[in-house]
């Protein structure tokens, strides 16, 4: 599961108890992996980042059915190149739990997606 929004992956400290946040509730309900943002981010940069992340990850399929699919962690850092402020906005991205591997992509996934996002 991916929560692409401001501080969606941030945990808040409540004193003597463990830090809590939306991440804990989702992981406690059975999610194996969750990607979120640790702090507030600019919407245009994160749009570019997300588009690049999904496009690169989904289209980096292995050539052999015996090979495992591409791992998300490889593309989290590479997608920062799409941001105008990579250290600030792409640096907020964090993955909790297991690192997902893309085994198959639905046909026609790319229909309607822009190749890149150019804001003026």
Image (tube, helix red, strand yellow):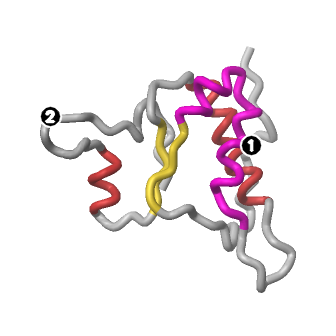
| Classed neighbour count for the residue bearing mark 1: other residues with Cα under 10 Å, few (<14), some (14–19), many (≥20) | some
Q: Residue furthest toward the bottom?
A: 66
- The x and y percentages for residue 26 are 33, 56
Rendered residue at 56%/22% (across/down): 42
The secondary element bearing badge 1 is classed as helix
* Image quadrant assignment for residue 105: bottom right
Q: Residue at x 29, y 63 (%)?
A: 29
Left or right of 34? Residue 66 is: right
In the drawing, what numbered circle is on residue 78? 1
* Vertical comparison of 14 with 42: above or below: below
User: 59 left or right of 2?
Assistant: right
**Residue 94 located left or right of residue 9:** right
Which residue reaches farthest left? 16
Instruction: Check residue 58 for magenta coloring.
Output: no
Mark 2 or mark 1, earlier in chain: 2
**In the rendered view, does 37 fall on the left or right side of 15?**
right
Could you tell me what secondary structure mostly forms the magenta stretch? helix
Q: Nearer the viewer, mark 2 or mark 1?
A: 2
Compared with residue 31, is residue 44 higher up or lower down, i.e. above or below?
above
Callout 2: SS: loop
Q: Which mark is residue 15?
A: 2
Query: Which quarter of the figure has residue 99?
Result: bottom right
Q: Which residues are magenta?
A: 70-92
């Amino acid at each position: 599961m991916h929560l692409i929004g401001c501080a969606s992956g941030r945990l808040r400290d409540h004193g003597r108890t463990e830090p809590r946040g939306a991440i804990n509730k989702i992981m406690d309900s059975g999610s194996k992996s969750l990607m979120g943002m640790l702090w507030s981010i600019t919407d245009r940069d994160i749009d570019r980042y997300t588009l690049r992340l999904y496009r690169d990850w989904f289209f980096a399929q292995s050539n052999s059915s015996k090979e495992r699919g591409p791992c998300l962690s490889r593309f989290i850092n590479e997608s920062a190149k799409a941001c105008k402020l990579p250290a600030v906005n792409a640096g907020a991205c964090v993955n909790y739990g297991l690192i997902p591997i893309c085994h198959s992509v639905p046909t026609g996934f790319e229909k309607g997606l822009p190749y890149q996002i150019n804001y003026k």
